[in-house]
Image: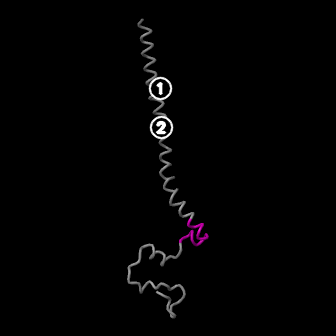
Amino acid sequence: MARQPLQRKGEFPPRLSMIIRSAPKATRYYKSGKGFLYRRLPFWMASLVNRVLVSFVPIIVLLIPALRVIPPVFSLRINCTSTVRYRALLAVERDHLTN
């Protein structure tokens, strides 16, 4: 579909004359234009920042609770290990005291 002579700048492709229903992202683009990153940065940099945000933000969101769980789990492991060794020590002491 080529631009018609009577169309104004920015009207291509004309959204009203489209037969196919447009995607939600396309509708949002027609309403608000380019996203914040794509308006402020060069395309290659905006694309890179967008990919980094999409990749690393969910990983960080998942890691924060995991990092909060690690110290109590480590402490529990140490307590369980020391309890087992302390019981063995008590058994040795009991044997020594009874003999």
Say what amino acid the circle numbered 1 marks. Answer: Ser
Q: SS class of the residue under badge 2? A: helix
The residue under the point 45% across, 72% down is: 25
For the C terminus, the quadrant is top left
- Which of pointers 1 and 2 indicates the residue nearer the eye? 1
Seen from this angle, which residue lies furthest bottom? 6
**Label 1, on which residue?**
82
**Is tag 1's residue or tag 2's residue first in the polypeptide sequence?**
2
Q: Nearer the viewer, residue 31 or 4?
A: 4
The residue under the point 48% across, 45% down is: 66
Magenta part of the protein: which range?
Answer: 35-47
Residue 50 is covered by the magenta coloring = no
* Snapshot quadrant of residue 96: top left
Q: Nearer the viewer, residue 9 or 5?
A: 5
Residue 43 is covered by the magenta coloring = yes
**Label 2, on which residue?**
72
In the depicted structure, whether residue 5 falls above or below residue 59: below
Measuring from the top left, give residue 94's x and y in whole percent: 42, 12
Measuring from the top left, give residue 31's x and y in whole percent: 48, 78
Say what amino acid the circle numbered 2 marks. Answer: Pro
Specify few, some or many for label 1: CA neighbours under 10 Å numbering under 14, 14-19, or 20 or more.
Answer: few
User: Of the numbered discs in the image, which one, if any, rests on residue 36?
Assistant: none
The residue under the point 54% across, 64% down is: 50
